[in-house]
Image (cartoon, helix red, strand yellow):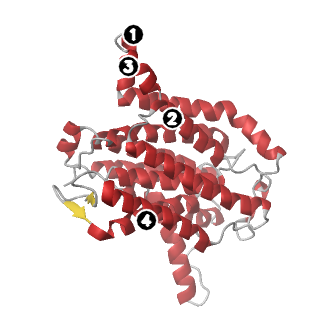
């Protein structure tokens, strides 16, 4: 909005030209999102306590989690509001990619809010059924895929970048909506499964947001995209600003979510943040790279799948002490903050490897 209001006045006041730069607006979107969370964080926590919107701990989690019972939840509301407000102020609202990211934020925010509501107020520890959540995730993913198939970037609507191979682009043709749905559902549930320790998921979301801010800037820059041999997307650069807002909101929330957590983001945050990152990856044609950028999320999902398969194949034996993987290390006696920081380090390593693939071709 500020781009519309202030940039036209640049001839009267020169410094307003800065609003024409994506890098300038990205920096301030991140800072503004941080400030929103920090300023309203304590008030939000007190409100959640007063309304009894608190964490309900499931019976099957490690015993150390019993002390988390009663911690305010649904912090995802604060995260998403900070992202939306900051993006509304600093993004180019005429950019179709920004409107799509707004839709993903609101849709999955409402889905996550519904799931949290069922958990907290309907006394159902698992919230919505897996089938119901998957259904609504698939509806959005397929709808987005169909929309992009018909109205995506001309010449690249059903295509994506392929890593490790130079000057080669994958075309999914009629299967593109299915591909988009898989990316959205996978990223959304990957973050949700990882959100089990104080600060773990939100820290990794910050890492992923930083990666896609850089990738979006490259995709929207004609010279850089040509140099890196990636698809040039005229409207892609603006996604940098939105990802910067996600990064800022993540850092602000980490202030309160670091061990011992004062508030949890709940499914309102976890389901939506994963979906937003997945949507950003789709819009800049870097969906496959998401496997590396979100490498920790991928590993967490794989450990759950392997645990289930192994349990069924062996008649009740376990491959890990508990899945997802972070619980396995908890039961091995590693303290929670150490697990979180080590997973962050691994996430940063995945990030550096992911960005390096742009030149490993």
Q: Can residue 153 be seen in this view?
A: yes
Q: Which residue is drawn at 35% across and 41% down?
A: 214
> Gap between marks 3 and 4, in whole Å?
38 Å
Helix, strand or loop status at disc 1: loop
Residue 289, x across and y down, in percent:
34, 56
Residue 28, x across and y down, in percent:
47, 27
Q: Which of marks 4 and 1 is nearer the N terminus?
A: 1
> Gap between marks 1 and 3, in whole Å?
10 Å
Q: Are the residues at dot 4 and dot 1 in contact (C-beta closer than 8 Å)?
A: no
Q: Which residue is drawn at 64% across and 62% down?
A: 330
> Gap between marks 4 and 1, in whole Å?
46 Å
The numbered mark at residue 142 is 4
Q: Which of marks 1 and 3 is nearer the N terminus?
A: 3
Q: Can residue 211 be seen in this view?
A: no
Q: Earlier in the sequence, mark 1 or mark 2?
A: 1
Residue 340, x across and y down, in percent:
57, 52
Up-down: is 151 above or below 206? below
Residues packed near mark 3 inside 10 Å, few (<14), some (14 to 19) or many (20 plus)? some
Look at mark 3 in the image and give the residue it sits on: 8
Look at mark 1 in the image and give the residue it sits on: 13
**For this view, does 64 lie left or right of residue 207?**
right
**For this view, does 148 lie left or right of residue 5?**
left
Marks 1 and 3: which is nearer the front? 3
Q: Residue at x 52, y 64 (%)?
A: 137
Which of these two is toward me, 177 or 199? 177
The numbered mark at residue 88 is 2
Q: Which of marks 2 and 3 is nearer the N terminus?
A: 3
């Amino acid at each position: 909005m500020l781009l519309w209001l202030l940039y036209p006045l640049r001839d009267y006041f020169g410094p307003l030209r800065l609003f024409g730069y994506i890098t300038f607006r990205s920096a301030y979107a991140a800072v503004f999102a941080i400030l929103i969370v920090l300023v309203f964080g304590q008030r939000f926590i007190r409100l959640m306590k007063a309304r009894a919107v608190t964490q309900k701990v499931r019976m099957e989690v490690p015993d150390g989690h019993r002390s988390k019972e009663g911690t305010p939840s649904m912090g995802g509301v604060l995260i998403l509001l900070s992202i939306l407000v900051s993006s509304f102020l600093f993004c180019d609202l005429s950019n179709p990619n920004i409107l799509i990211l707004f839709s993903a934020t609101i849709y999955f925010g409402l889905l996550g809010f519904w799931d949290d509501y069922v958990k907290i107020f309907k006394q159902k520890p698992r919230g919505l059924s897996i089938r119901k959540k998957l259904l609504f995730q698939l509806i959005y993913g397929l709808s987005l895929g169909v929309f992009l198939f018909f109205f995506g970037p001309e010449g690249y609507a059903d295509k994506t970048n392929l890593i490790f191979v130079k000057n080669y682009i994958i075309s999914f043709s009629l299967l593109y909506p299915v591909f988009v749905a898989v990316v959205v559902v996978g990223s959304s549930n990957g973050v949700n499964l990882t959100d089990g320790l104080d600060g773990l998921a939100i820290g990794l979301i910050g890492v992923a947001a930083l990666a896609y801010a850089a990738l979006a800037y490259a995709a929207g820059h004609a010279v850089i995209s040509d140099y890196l041999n990636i698809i040039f997307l005229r409207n892609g650069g603006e996604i940098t600003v939105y990802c910067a807002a996600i990064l800022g909101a993540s850092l602000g929330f980490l202030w309160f979510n670091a061990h011992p957590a004062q508030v949890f983001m709940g499914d309102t945050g976890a389901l939506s943040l994963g979906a937003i990152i997945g949507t950003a990856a789709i819009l800049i044609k870097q969906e496959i790279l998401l496997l590396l950028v979100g490498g920790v999320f991928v590993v967490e999902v794989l450990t759950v799948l392997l645990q289930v398969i192994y349990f069924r194949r062996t008649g009740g034996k376990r491959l890990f002490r508990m899945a997802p993987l972070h619980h396995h290390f908890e039961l091995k006696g590693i303290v929670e903050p150490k697990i979180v920081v080590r997973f962050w380090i691994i996430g940063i390593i995945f990030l550096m490897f992911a960005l390096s693939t742009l030149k490993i071709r």
